[in-house]
Image: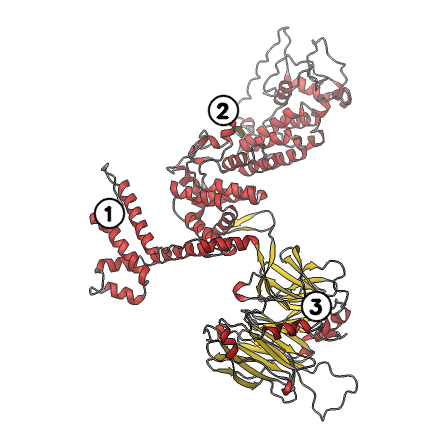
Amino acid sequence: MSEFWLDELSNFGDYANNQELTDILTLSNDPNSVSDVRVSPDGRHIHIILRKPKVGLVTFDKYESPQSGQTHKKLELSSSRTLPVVDICYLDHHNNNNSSRGTAAVAVVYENGKAEFWSFHERKAGWRLLQTADLCNGPRARVVSVCACSSFIIWCEERPPPESSPSLGSTRNKLEFCVCRRDFEVEDGSVSLGGVKITLHNSPKFTVMSSGDYVHLVPYMKGKPLQCVSSKFLLTWSPHHDSFTVSAVCKNTPIKKVSAKESDFKKLITDCLGYFFALEPPELYNASPTGCGGLLLLLSTGWLCLLQKDGTLRHVYKLPGNSLAKHGTHTSFCMYQNILALVVGQTLHLIESSCGKELQTFLLKAKGMLFVNPARRQTPFLLSDTGLFVVLDKKTDASNCSSKVKPVETVHPEALLVEAVFEEACKYYQQRSLSSTQLTVDALKRGRFQAPISLASILRCYLSTGLRKKDAEMLLNPGGGLIAGQGKLMVSLEGELRILVSLEELKGSLVRGGPKEVEVMCENLVEKEMVRLLSSSELDKEALLYLNSIFSIFPCQAWRAAQAALQLHYNGEGSLSSRAPPDVWKTVLSLTTTSSPTAVLLFTNGQPKRNHGVRNDHTRKPAAFLPVFELLCRSILHFQPTWLPKFLELAQQQQGSAGLGLSLASSSWSFSGGRGGEGGENNMPLYRRALCVLSGVNPDGDQDLEVELLLVGGRPNAILQALRILMRKQQWERVTQVAQRFCKQSPLLNKEIFTTLLCEVTHHRDLDPYLDLLWALCPEDFTVTTILNLVLKNLPSPHTPSHPATFFMSHATPSSPSPFADPDSSQLTIGLLKPLLRKVLQRETKPSQRYVDILQSPLYPPPALPRQPTDPLGCVTDPSADSAALRAETPELQSSTNIQRSGVALPADPLT
């Protein structure tokens, strides 16, 4: 947690006439006296607007040399003019071609509409009057508030009705005000003003406040609050968008937004009058602009709110207790980036603006006024009758101090880049050299190879002058400084050189920028690098290792950059879409080599397979570098785990639609660490690759996510493995849903699923509510004999503790139970199998249509009857008779009869 302290910048000893300044600030007992003090943006000028008993303006200046303050002229307007000063506005001289050091330009606006423009020159005579002008057009106009915004002055003036108009008696017209503006431009020695433009007419009395490029029209807060409709809302005017936003302090969202072409206030709010009458907003105590378009509002409820430039109202901080119980309590507050400073009475509160947390409080000796220094917008400055103070952060101040003591080395970027060119060239030639002699940079510089020397010369020329069109023409001219071939090379490398220079500028910005700037630049750089790498035709090992380092160092930025590169879009209905080209997906799905094959868990036939020759603590370490698909899966598991099955489904669609499977199979890369089943190592299914990542990230296993991946994979082994997991978790409803869904894919898969479920039915009774659904999945080629053989082979042992009684057992067993099953027993009865057997028998007794044409042809005699096998006792076993007898049994007999033939082998096909 940050710790702050108050540091005194000045006790007014370095200001001219400091004793008078101290006396004015100390002897003023008016609660609003501090609000009549204005401080210049650089803190060198303090202006005090006198209200009572005198009327005028007094200025106190801070000079670099004490002698200058004794001879220079002050900006002091005495009360002999009897004209009240409305306000003093500092003009943005940096945007108006007046950037001379030690200068300042201000506009002093009087109540009758006259404005005096003054400039301060420390090296000359101090304050000097530039010009006097009338802001208002009418002589009877009266200015009530004024401010400067960007390149114009905006004010609210009162326009009394003509004397010939009928009198309103005691009730004055509250809509006789007008908001006007005039453009200005400060030149050396003069100020040029544009014409008067009306922003809003027929309006109530407003206080105009500029914040960045926006102007807020706030209900007039001086004196007693007016109980009328106009005091229940605020207007925000955007000159850039030429629009008004209507907001209320009791609503978190703007009421409406209209075009500023309609400048009549009455027409602007006509459709909202009924809504305003119903509102009961709290009283507005004070307001302060944030400097970036927003407005801070202090309400009578004790809430300090932030009105954003779009009209959204956010509650930031609630004053403790009843701090504002006394009307007229002195308040001052300002926003300093992420810190909000609030003075209530003699207490200074520091608040974190993002969450409203109170960081620290200070008890002041006297009331003070906060102001903002544009050169240090993140630091609170405070003016009180004892001096100027600044709020410092110990950590920030310590880092600033340490950064000041560090020696600064002057390094020329062109020298470093030229050296990098030779080092890269040395590496390039060494890899392609047949000699064992080590190549050095000095050998390259001596002229052994001309390419790095030419490139270094081009780089020096570009970095020193930059390549413009004129320079390019000069280089192409044989009379230029370089040879013609080198000039052509420089022109062709212009794009690459521009990228190189921008990269060096980015490096410098990263070194010089603050934390927020560095974060933004890192995100932009990661996004560019992600797009560049994924757009390449094939990633080599170095590029892949570089991509792994990006995901490792900047995980959050890499995830956002990957979404942008793949153009992933989640439609909210459970599916992902991508508009990335096939080449990008080819790079993503390419199967590459990892340098640590023991770090990857692979699956064989849906079962996890571990390398038992390595210790478990080593198998859980991440691979040295992962392929792109595995990197994306790991990032998705970290930030959006529920997206992984959808991403796998999208990847399979891209692999199938673009024909990427063929290219992957022919790739020269391989994925080490597992067997090459299901198409070989180079064509491992994507679902198995995703399962490898899931097992590596979560060694304990997320079975729900594993089931989803197996089902999305769609392979028979994967589906059967998913069924086994669901049966192990006893999610029987989900088991039946999966079976119904995938039995339609192929007869072979249908047979495997039905066999698995039939074997499960023999062990317990949990699937009994779903037997009708399971019997409907019975394959067409299954016979009664096949079903009975499966049941007999998978019956649990009669001595199994978890299954004390079974239905199918040998009659010769001494411990045979009674022929009637216990109602709570888990044994399988013939009554449960009866619907299935009846269905199969009905299908078997139907005449086969396979040989119908042969049987009806008179040219062929009917086939001879097959010989029937005999049992050891000489009796002929007729399966047809057995089947007929089974069909002839009554339902009561069938449901209570036990088969006593577990040791007899039934014929494979009784109907042949």
Residue sitting farthest toward the top: 873
Name the residue nearer the viewer: 127 or 741.
Answer: 127
Q: Quadrant of residue 477?
A: bottom left
Q: Which residue is mark 3?
A: 330
Mark 3 or 1: in front is 3
Q: Quadrant of residue 349?
A: bottom right
Name the residue nearer the viewer: 748 or 857.
Answer: 748
| Inter-mark Cα distance, 2 to 1 | 51 Å
| Inter-mark Cα distance, 3 to 2 | 75 Å
Q: Is residue 403 left or right of residue 260?
A: left
Q: Position of residue 315 (x, y in %)?
A: 68, 60
Secondary structure of the residue carrying tag 3 is loop
Q: Which residue is mark 1?
A: 444
Q: Position of residue 158 (x, y in %)?
A: 67, 83
Q: Is residue 19 left or right of residue 100?
A: right
Q: Position of residue 516 (x, y in %)?
A: 52, 55
Mark 3 or 2: in front is 3
Secondary structure of the residue carrying tag 1 is helix
Q: Amino acid at mark 3?
A: His
Q: Quadrant of residue 46?
A: bottom right
The residue sitting at 48% across, 33% down in the picture is 600
Q: Position of residue 291 (x, y in %)?
A: 58, 67
Q: Is residue 575 left or right of residue 433?
A: right
Q: Which residue is mark 2?
A: 612
Contact (Cβ within 8 Å) of mark 3 with mark 2 = no
